[in-house]
Image: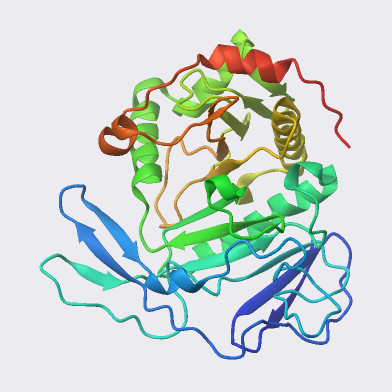
Amino acid sequence: MHSLELTKPDGRALTLYSRAPLAPVDAAPSPFAEPLASKAHLRWHPLRGEWVTYATHRQDRTFQPPPEYDPLAATTDRDRPTELPGGDWEVAVFDNRFPALGGQGAADVPELHVATAAAAGHCEVVVYTPERTTALGALALGHIELLLEVWCDRTRRLGARDDIRYVLPFENRGVEVGATLHHPHGQIYAYPVVPPVPARMDAVAREHVQTHGRGPLEAMIAAERSDGARMLYAGEHAVAFVPVCARYPYECWIAPVRAAAQFADLAAAERADLARALKTVLLKYDRVWQRPMPYLMAWFQAPCDGDTHPGAHLHAQITPPYRTRDRLKFLAGTELAAGFFAMDALPEEKARELQAIEVELT
C-alpha cells in the first residue's frame, strides 16, 4: 500500500492511498477557505451512564446535492470546488468538515447540572474510489483489500493518540439511513471513550473467555459453519452469515474465522478472504432488492486503550433498514425505549433468500 499526505487550505488533513506508487499532487483542494471550529461538547446522561455529544454546527453540512454535483468528486469545473484532487489514487481519507467529535478550535462547553466535557476525538471521511457512480460492492477484490488496509492504517494512526480509546469505521449507504452525499464513501469515528455498544461487547467477550475458553463470536462462527443454514460465504479464512440472533431482516455479519482483535492483526490471506466475503454480501443485497440497497455497516474491533481484550474479534455488522419488500423497518418503541428488538421474520427465511442469489466475484 502506498500513501500521500497533504494538507487542505483550511488546515484539514488529506491522505491518498493506492496499490501502486502515487504521482505527486499539486495541491489538496477544499470547498472552504477557512477552518471550522466545531464547538462540539459532551453531556453526561445520568440514567444511562453514558456520554451524549452535541454538535449543532452539523446542521449546516452538505445534504444530498444534485447528482450532477458531488463535492467529493474531482471535477474540471473550477467554479465547483471539490474535496479531492485528480490523480491516480484509489482511496482517500480526509478530516470531516463537520465533525461530531473533535475538530479545530476550542470547544464551547457550557456549565450545567450534569457533567460536561469537550467532545474530544476525531472524525474522518473515507472515499472508497474516485468513481462517483459505483458502489463498494462493485469494486474489484483488490480494491476492497486496499480499503481494509486503509481502515487498518487509520486505526493504527488514530489509536496511537492519547485522547482516543475506540476507532469505528462505518458506512451509511442511502438517504434512507442518513447518507448526505452520492459518492461511495464511509466514515471513521475515533472516540475519547469506548462507546456503550462495543463496551458491552467487550464485557461479554471477557466473561465468555473466562467461562468457555474462547470468545463468543469465535464460538458462534464455529456453530454457524457447522450448521450451514444461514451461511452466505464460507471461505478458508473468512465467513459471512445471517446471525441466528439477527435483529433485522437481511442482517449479515462478516468476520475472519480466527479471532483477530483489530485490522492490524489480519494476515494477508485473511484480508483477501474478508474482501471476498464482503463483496459477496453486498452483491447479494443489491440483487435481492433489484436496486441499491440501503444499509448501515459498522466494523467492530478491540478498543485502543492499551488494555488487553480477551475474546475481541474483528467483524462487520450490516443492518439494512427493511422489514418487508414494501415497508421500511425503522426502530420502534420497544427498540428505541427498551433496547428490546422485535423481528417480523426469521433469520433462516432471509438467509435462504440471500443464499439463492448467485454472484460472481471479480
**Residue 205 picture location, percent across and down:** 40, 33
Residue in view at x 66 percent, y 13 percent: 352
Q: Is residue 298 left or right of residue 359?
A: left
- The image's colour scheme reads rainbow
**Residue 258 picture location, percent across and down:** 61, 31
Residue 190 in view here: yes
Where is 87 relative to 251, above or below? below
Residue in view at x 71 percent, y 40 percent: 292
Residue 262 in view here: no
**Residue 50 picture location, percent across and down:** 26, 53
Q: Where is the C terminus found, in terms of image quarters?
A: top right
Where is 26 relative to 242, above or below? below
Q: Is residue 356 left or right of residue 298?
A: right
What count of labels does the image hold? 0
**Residue 259 picture location, percent across and down:** 56, 34
229 and 292: which one is in front? 292
Where is 250 relative to 303, above or below? above
Residue in view at x 65 percent, y 18 percent: 231
Q: Where is the N terminus found, in terms of image quarters?
A: bottom right
Q: In this view, which residue lies farthest toward the left?
A: 113
Query: Quadrant of the rendered structure where residue 310 is?
Result: top left
104 and 70: which one is in front? 70
Residue in view at x 82 percent, y 46 percent: 139
152 and 311: which one is in front? 152
Query: Quadrant of the rendered structure where residue 3 is?
Result: bottom right
